[in-house]
Image: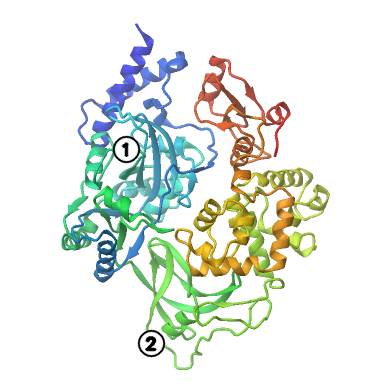
Amino acid sequence: MNIKKEIIFLSTELHKHNYLYYMLDKPEISDYEFDKMMKKLEDLEFKFPQFKDPNSPSQRVGSLLNNSFNSVNHNFPMYSLENSYSKDELIKWKDRLVKILKTEKISFSCELKLDGVSVSVSYKKGNLSQGLTRGDGVSGDDVTENIKTINTIPLKTLTKVEYDFDVRGEVIIEKTDFVKLNERKIKNSEEPYKNPRNTASGSIKLVSSKEVRKRPLKCYFFQIVSENNPFNTQSESLNALKDLGFNVSNSHKYCKNIDEVFEFISYWYKQKENLNFEIDGIVVKVNSFSMQKHLGFTSKFPRWAIAYKFQTEQAITKLVDIDFQVGRTGAITPVANLEPVLLNGTVVKRASLHNEDQIDKLDLYQNDTLTVEKGGEIIPKIVSVDYRLRNLKSKKISFIKNCPACGSLLFKNDDEAQHYCLNSKGCYPQIVSRFKHFISRKGMNIDGFGTETIERLLKKDIIKNFDDIYNLKVSQLVGLERMAQKSAENLVFAIYNSKAQPYHKVLYSLGIRHVGETVSKRLASHFTTINDLINASYEDILNVDEIGEKIAMSLKQYFNETKNLDLLKKLNDLGLNFSQNKSEKKGTSLNKLSFVITGTFEKISRDSLKNIILNNGGKVVSSISSKAIIISGRNPGPSKISKAKDLKIQTLSLEDFINSYNINF
């Protein structure tokens, strides 16, 4: 018997029967026959691991090993969708399209907006290579091993595909499966799950893929993205995805005009309760890909797509009192404390009131009876007040005049709704929030540097500004409460490693008002050094794509302050990246070398290790070849270690890696 051919035959048959059972609901063999075939494949793969395919059907079983969810950049950004709540808003969106495209002949693809967890799954030549959560849209958590356990996500396409592509989908738990899941929980005297959406979200991030396998997760796909996309329309691509073996809802519809879009919305609003999964609206997309390309994107949304949101579930509760919170930029946000109420499967206790205008618009009094809903099904908000139930002795809610933290008089611009505390140097919540922003995962990404540590360092006057972080010594940290020698050493090491963060992340971490992640990337691409940005005129900044007047004004104000320029110089002298070229490459000691990172590391995150390799001229690859070098931490991938041994590939510990190469941090 040719073992390799037998393994390939069994894999192909099992992939086919998995598709027939889970996608088409047309099984051709019994469960017993399927399990028997799977057992035979597993036995052969165990005896002959050199013939095992990384996307073998046996990989759906999952692993008991703990997953480490590393942040990985998406091949193509996963943008959010602009929301609309009325037909008038949809018509205004359509009118904007007509104005840009200069034609009334625009057709649409309408799809149900499933209420689940968005994922992006990458395929190379038809083989699943990686699965990421949406994350912040720029990068997401690597959940590949968990993704592989979901039967409705193909490990291989039904037919061979010569180009690489990503598919976007929504991972959900269907209503009937959710009921069965909770019946098992109750039978075992366990607390039942609150709702399908939250359960799906938690399941996709379980540390053991073996446990993920036990959850009844399904994925419905809605988009294909590729540099070599062969399709002309969204409708065509959805049909092609179905032919390739992807689970695509049959509910999508081609609409030749906006009137047909409204008919589609009306139909599903009435029928949504009859579906076996939760939806919170309809996604409307321009059908033509050439038109989509012409329309492009804003900094947050694709111009060619919009979500029409259905009216959300509401609940009645009472206002207890209002807290006023101080943000990083000094913005004061009123937050309503509510009597706890169940809404969309979760208990709601607080709701943002945004600003003084919102309080005045609602005409709030103490102990008012309120109607609350979840805006976008996530964020609780107050939508109305029942004035008939108001106690005549209740006191009107007024916006505060002074900062609740430092007592400074609040300031409000005529053109802004927000009040601000301008005491940025002496207002404690602002100071703490700025440091939290600086060290955050999206900023300098300093592992092990929590809020409590920041507060203790501030109270002891050890840190006053960002540059002080990079001068911290182990001896200073060990003296803090709950900071042992080992933890202190790890934190100093993490601080040192954060210097490898790229220019755009350093720019974001500074916390300049109105300069978020996307804006930071645009600015770093346009002004390739911080000096170019500092010296740019107001008009120069406005010329950057998607940068408006508020952002340009905020940047000029920031760079006009001497204290900020002094800080930037200190951070630059300490080795932080303030240029595009510098962040891309800082050394050449790893030139022409390829590394595979596997397992977890105590003193460094995988992202930081990846940056160090890239900044010293090396490459980080996911697949093992005879030319790659493995850096192995705790709980390495067993298939990678096995393949490395078969190919006699060099395997290094983190310490071996540091000592073996002249690394330029």
* First of labels 1, 2 by sequence position: 1
Q: Looking at this view, is 208 or 606 the one in front? A: 606
Quadrant hosting residue 26:
top left
Quadrant hosting residue 32:
top left
The disc labelled 2 sits on which kind of residue?
Tyr
Per the model, the C-alpha gap separating discs 1 and 2 is 50 Å
The disc labelled 1 sits on which kind of residue?
Thr
Q: Looking at this view, is 491 or 48 the one in front? A: 491
Q: Nearer the viewer, mark 1 or mark 2?
A: 1
Q: Position of residue 535 (x, y in %)?
A: 62, 61
Q: Position of residue 380 (x, y in %)?
A: 43, 68
On residue 387, the disc is 2
Q: Residues within 10 Å of mark 2 (few under 14, many from 20)?
A: some
State the SS at label 1: loop
Q: Residues within 10 Å of mark 1 (few under 14, many from 20)?
A: many
Which residue carries the number 1 mark?
152
Asked if one can make out residue 513 in the rendered structure from this viewpoint, the answer is no
483 left or right of 600 in image:
right
On residue 170, the disc is none
